[in-house]
């Protein structure tokens, strides 16, 4: 009986494993692996620092540093030990960071150890792990709120209880204290055009684990400014699945600074009839398409640099590590200059390591086109024509990018991609319709970027033997065409004056034809 059940289970697994999606309305989606996080430390350094913070074996230390969220779960003394070790290695340079609070110090350490990795993702995962292991001390579940890389949540400014609705009330009245928002109001009023777009998001909590979805919200009034503050843009964001309410442009920050007292509040009314228990307001960095493009350049550069370091012999890894740290920007420097990030990206491909290591920087060897999923590779015979135009705007590529699971050789412009899909929760490739889980599923194609600078006037190239080159010119020149025209006799033109008369015989038809030479 046991053998038959095992056999049936094996047949079931075999059948479901080989099942293919045949519905046409399903999105082209492939089973994926987690992308490896680029760790700047070598294996010997991981073993050494693991012993210093209480991880006795290399296996424990390796598992600990594979997940950046574990850095946020470390205590302040262990973070200090880790940062001092990074100071000795030259990875960190500033000693004043040690005076920071635990969360800020962990943020700097993650930015140093995992260059280009989204720090907010590590923090959200750490919050989830901490909440699941400490249910009594658990806070609000911000990690369960739908978001994207374009909306990076920074910190919680305030949290306040909400009075329950009475039976005859159909409007929810919210009172937000002004005092915790005064510092933000000063920065918002003095904000310049090139500053970060820091916005305020309001969350209404049904419990500590669940937020209210404002899908049925029809009006939203702040300080009795009317009921027309719930715009179409807010409705579109809610349709995408977001659960926040952006109150940045709905509040008059000048009046907040002028009339603010210790007990002043911002009064909000909306047609929410749910049983809201708490409200919270957080600062969120709304990234522009150009800022996301810069983040993608830094991420691609760090992935390439760490990959070169991993493929280098262990004796040479510290030297490669020093080269990488000299090229990559520090966590204290601004990362908004796209030209500087492009220079860093090119340096990671041309200046780090030896030429033999650089030759392994193609997309397939880097793991970008990972085809180890049991799928057959596509066989392409002959040359493949590659367009240098963005598939959306049909403009020439400036920041060539594509997904790590895309099998096509053509690229799309990263800035145009983020511009068109900035507010969407699900990102899809314009060419193959593959879904991108996050910005980590994208990368900048270095070979395409080099081809764009080498051939600035071409709009289409040919991929021949793995190399991008211009299309072949015509096989004949102008002089050859003139010689060929003079040597070939002029063809005769026959004018047929046949009037489609069936009674005419062949001799009559032949006499009606005139030959002109």
Image (cartoon, rainbow, N blue to C red):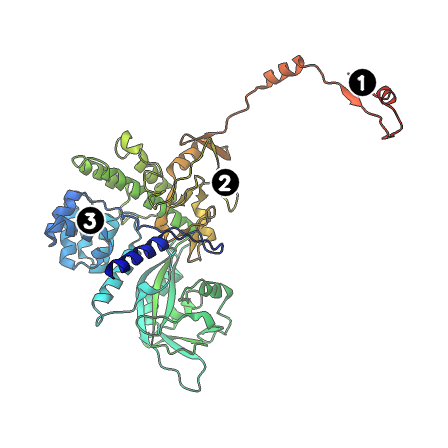
Question: Who's the residue at 29% across and 69% down the image?
Answer: 140
Image height of 513 relative to 146, above or below:
above
Give the foreground label among 2 and 3: 2
- Residue 94 circle label: 3
For the view shown, which residue lies furthest in the bottom direction?
A: 168
- Residue 475 circle label: none
Quick one: 224 or 207, which is closer to the camera?
207
Circle 3 packing at 10 Å, graded few (<14), some (14-19), many (20+), is few
Question: Who's the residue at 20% across and 59% down the image?
Answer: 73
Is disc 3 placed on a helix, strand or loop?
A: loop
Circle 2 packing at 10 Å, graded few (<14), some (14-19), many (20+), is many
The answer to whether the residue labelled 2 contacts the one labelled 3, judged by CB atoms less than 8 Å apart, is no
Quick one: 127 or 12, which is closer to the camera?
12
For the view shown, which residue lies furthest in the right direction?
A: 503
- Counting residues from the N terminus, which is met first, the one under dot 2 or under dot 1? 2
Give the foreground label among 2 and 1: 1
Q: Is the N terminus in the top left, top right, bottom left or bottom right quadrant?
A: bottom left
Q: Is the C terminus in the top left, top right, bottom left or bottom right quadrant?
A: top right
Circle 1 packing at 10 Å, graded few (<14), some (14-19), many (20+), is few
Quadrant in the picture for residue 306: top left
- Counting residues from the N terminus, which is met first, the one under dot 3 or under dot 1? 3
Determine which residue is flagged by label 2.
Answer: 389
The answer to whether the residue labelled 3 contacts the one labelled 1, judged by CB atoms less than 8 Å apart, is no
Q: Position of residue 475 (x, y in %)?
A: 54, 21
Q: CA distance from mark 2 to mark 3?
A: 44 Å
Give the foreground label among 3 and 1: 1
Locate residue 478 relative to residue 75 in the image: left or right: right
Q: Position of residue 86 (x, y in %)?
A: 17, 47
Please say whether residue 105 is visible from this viewpoint.
no
Is disc 1 placed on a helix, strand or loop?
A: strand
Question: Who's the residue at 55% across and 24% down the image?
Answer: 474
Determine which residue is flagged by label 1.
Answer: 515
């Amino acid at each position: 009986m046991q053998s038959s059940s095992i056999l049936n289970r094996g047949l079931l697994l075999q059948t479901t494993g080989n099942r293919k999606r045949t519905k046409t309305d399903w999105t082209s989606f492939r089973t994926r692996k987690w992308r490896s996080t680029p760790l700047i430390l070598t294996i010997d350094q991981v073993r050494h620092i693991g012993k210093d913070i209480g991880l006795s074996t290399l296996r424990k230390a390796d598992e600990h540093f594979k997940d950046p969220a574990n850095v946020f779960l470390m205590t302040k003394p262990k973070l200090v030990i880790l940062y001092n070790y990074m100071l000795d290695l030259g990875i960190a340079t500033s000693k004043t960071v040690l005076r920071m609070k635990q969360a800020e110090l962990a943020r700097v350490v993650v930015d140093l150890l995992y260059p280009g990795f989204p720090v907010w993702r590590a923090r959200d995962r750490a919050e989830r792990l901490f909440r699941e292991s400490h249910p009594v001390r658990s806070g609000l579940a911000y990690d369960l709120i739908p978001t994207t890389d374009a909306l990076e949540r920074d910190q919680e400014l305030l949290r306040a209880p909400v009075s329950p609705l009475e039976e005859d009330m159909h409007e929810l009245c919210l009172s937000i204290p002004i005092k915790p928002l005064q510092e933000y109001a000063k920065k918002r009023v003095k904000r310049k055009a090139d500053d970060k777009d820091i916005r305020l998001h309001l969350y209404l909590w049904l419990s500590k684990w669940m937020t209210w979805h404002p899908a049925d919200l029809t009006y939203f009034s702040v300080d009795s400014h009317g009921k027309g503050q719930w715009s179409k843009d807010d409705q579109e964001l809610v349709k995408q699945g977001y659960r926040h309410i952006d109150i940045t442009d709905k509040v008059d920050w000048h009046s907040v600074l002028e009339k603010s007292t210790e007990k002043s509040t911002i009064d909000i009314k909306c047609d929410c009839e749910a049983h809201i228990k708490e409200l919270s307001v957080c600062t969120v960095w709304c990234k522009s398409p150009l800022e996301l493009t810069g983040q993608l350049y830094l991420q691609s550069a760090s992935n390439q640099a760490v990959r070169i370091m991993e493929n280098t012999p262990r004796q040479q890894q510290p030297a490669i590590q020093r080269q990488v740290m000299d090229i990559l920007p520090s966590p204290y420097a601004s990362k908004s200059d796209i030209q500087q990030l492009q220079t860093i990206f090119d340096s990671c491909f041309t200046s780090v390591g030896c030429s033999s290591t650089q030759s392994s920087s193609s997309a397939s060897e880097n793991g970008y086109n990972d085809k180890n999923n049991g799928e057959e590779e596509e066989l392409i015979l002959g040359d493949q024509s590659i367009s240098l135009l963005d598939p959306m705007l049909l403009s020439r590529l400036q920041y060539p990018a594509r997904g790590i699971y895309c099998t096509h050789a053509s690229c799309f412009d990263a800035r145009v991609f983020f511009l068109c899909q900035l507010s969407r929760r699900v990102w899809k490739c314009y060419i193959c319709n593959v879904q991108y889980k996050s910005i980590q599923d994208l990368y900048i194609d270095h070979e395409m970027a080099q081809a764009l600078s080498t051939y600035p006037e071409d709009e289409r190239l040919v991929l021949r033997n793995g190399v991008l080159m211009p299309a072949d010119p015509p096989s004949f020149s102008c002089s050859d065409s003139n010689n060929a025209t003079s040597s070939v006799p002029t063809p005769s033109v026959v004018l047929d004056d046949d009037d489609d008369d069936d009674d005419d015989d062949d001799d009559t038809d032949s006499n009606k034809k005139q030959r002109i030479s």
